[in-house]
Amino acid sequence: MPTAHAYAATSAKSPLGPLAIQRRELGPRDVLIEVKFCGICHSDIHTVRDEWGAATYPLVPGHEIAGIVASVGAEVKKHAVGDRVGVGCMVDSCGDCSSCRKGEEQHCLKGMVGTYGATGRDGQLTQGGYSTHIVVTEDFVLKIPEGIPLDAAAPLLCAGITTYSPLRRWGAGPGKKVAIVGLGGLGHMGVKLARAMGAEVTVLSQSLSKKEDGLRLGAHHYYALSDPRI
Ligand SMILES: [Zn+2]
Ligand SMILES: [Zn+2]
């Protein structure tokens, strides 16, 4: 089995530390990825601190994974060795239920498999991207275009898609106004994406302490929620 070197939490209170973990042997449709970058999402922190309950240890977080394909199973068609790829918050689903057939694997009727802290369809606990390597079935491996550096691509896989999806669904674009509440990890992505889509962008923040950053990232307007005039 491929060994990966990872950063794992061993309890809700301990800091993350180095741990060698075993990835599964490559199945016919599996892809082995050498992880180059992994974003830090606040969900990682909630999970390792067991703030959402049911955490299992040791736990390797990380679901904004960008890397290079190191090896592929015999039947893999979508990816080849050397490809630039990413993995987000899901690594598997049944592939066969009505949700999966609609491309809504997150609503898989048998339960999608989370990138870490979940039980995979092989019965093993999944471990995330704070590691040197990960094995993922090809359907949950995304291509990263040449024009996007891997370090910049990683946060698009959770914070990015989380903000892109509603902007796209509600038609953000020229002539539309978008307000982003909070300029944090997701908020700054929302500002950049909404601006790139052509919308008029307003940030509603607690204070004006990040106003300069907000405007630099593309916001047209920036207000403090603590200001009694708004
Ligand atoms: Zn996340
Ligand atoms: Zn399904």
Image: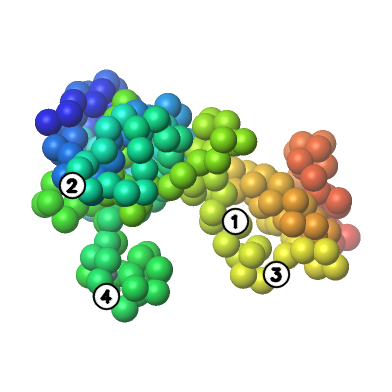
SS label for mark 2:
loop
Mark 4 close to ligand 2, CB under 8 Å:
yes
SS label for mark 3:
loop
Badge 1 or badge 2: first in the primary sequence: 2
To which residue does mark 4 refer?
A: 97
Badge 4 or badge 3: first in the primary sequence: 4
Q: CA distance from mark 1 to mark 2?
A: 34 Å
In this view, the residue in front, 50 or 227, is 50
To which residue does mark 2 refer?
A: 28
| Amino acid identity at mark 4 | Cys
Badge 4 or badge 2: first in the primary sequence: 2
Q: Residues within 10 Å of mark 2 (few under 14, many from 20)?
A: few
- Do the residues under discs 1 and 2 have CB atoms within 8 angstroms? no
To which residue does mark 3 refer?
A: 171
| Amino acid identity at mark 3 | Gly
Residue 126 visible, this angle: no
| Amino acid identity at mark 2 | Pro
